[in-house]
Amino acid sequence: MKWLAGLLVIALGVAGLVRGAVAQPAKSSGGGGSVVGVDGQIRQLSATTAAATMTVYNTTGTADRITSAQSGAGAQTTLYKSSILVPAHGSVALTGARRLVITQLYSPLRAGQYVTIALSLQTAGNILVTARVPTSTGSSGSVSPSTPSGAHS
């Protein structure tokens, strides 16, 4: 019977890891709909810095603002400006100069790795976005093989 309890703990732990790898929507207090981040990508820019891009969709009837971000990949995660508007029934692309920057990386990023980023929104609360390190060179930037895509406000 003890082994059954252990198996249950392992199964729940795996389920939590799988859930963590999927964007988690935040319900808004403004009625139906949710806020969710998708298409996350992260690229290492230097030994201590990475940049993450994504699109945040707001299907609620109320505009919201991203006020901060956090990631376990580095000591500090910075938005390109102090508050980013996500319009009601709209989206905002965090790409190019509008990306998130993660500094003081704890370790080098590896191709194919997933990094979870927590975005804090003024109304909807927190959402989790999974950003993937690309496995090959793409048109939006280069990646070393040994190291690791709306409307605008």
Image (cartoon, rainbow, N blue to C red):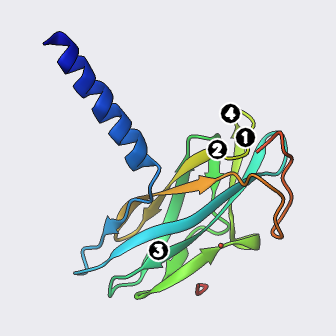
| Residue at numbered disc 2 | 113
Question: Residue beneath label 1, please?
Answer: 110
Tag in front: 4 or 1: 1
Residue 6: percent from the left, percent from the top? 25, 18
Secondary structure of the residue carrying tag 2 is: loop
Q: Does 50 sit above or below residue 35?
A: above
Q: Which of 149/153 is in front? A: 149
Which residue matches tag 3? 65
21 horizontally vs 51: left or right? left
Question: Nearer the N terminus, badge 2 or badge 4?
Answer: 4
Q: Tell me how far mark 4 sits from mark 1, CA to CA.
A: 12 Å
> Which quadrant of the view contains residue 140?
bottom right
Amino acid type, label 2: Gln
Question: Is residue 130 rendered to the left or right of residue 18?
Answer: right
Q: Which quarter of the rendered picture does the C terminus lie within?
A: bottom right
Q: Which mark is first along the chain, 3 or 2?
A: 3
Q: Are marks 2 and 1 in contact (CB under 8 Å)?
A: yes
Identified at 43% across, 69% down, the residue is: 36
N-term-proximal mark, 1 vs 3: 3
Write down the residue under mark 4: 106
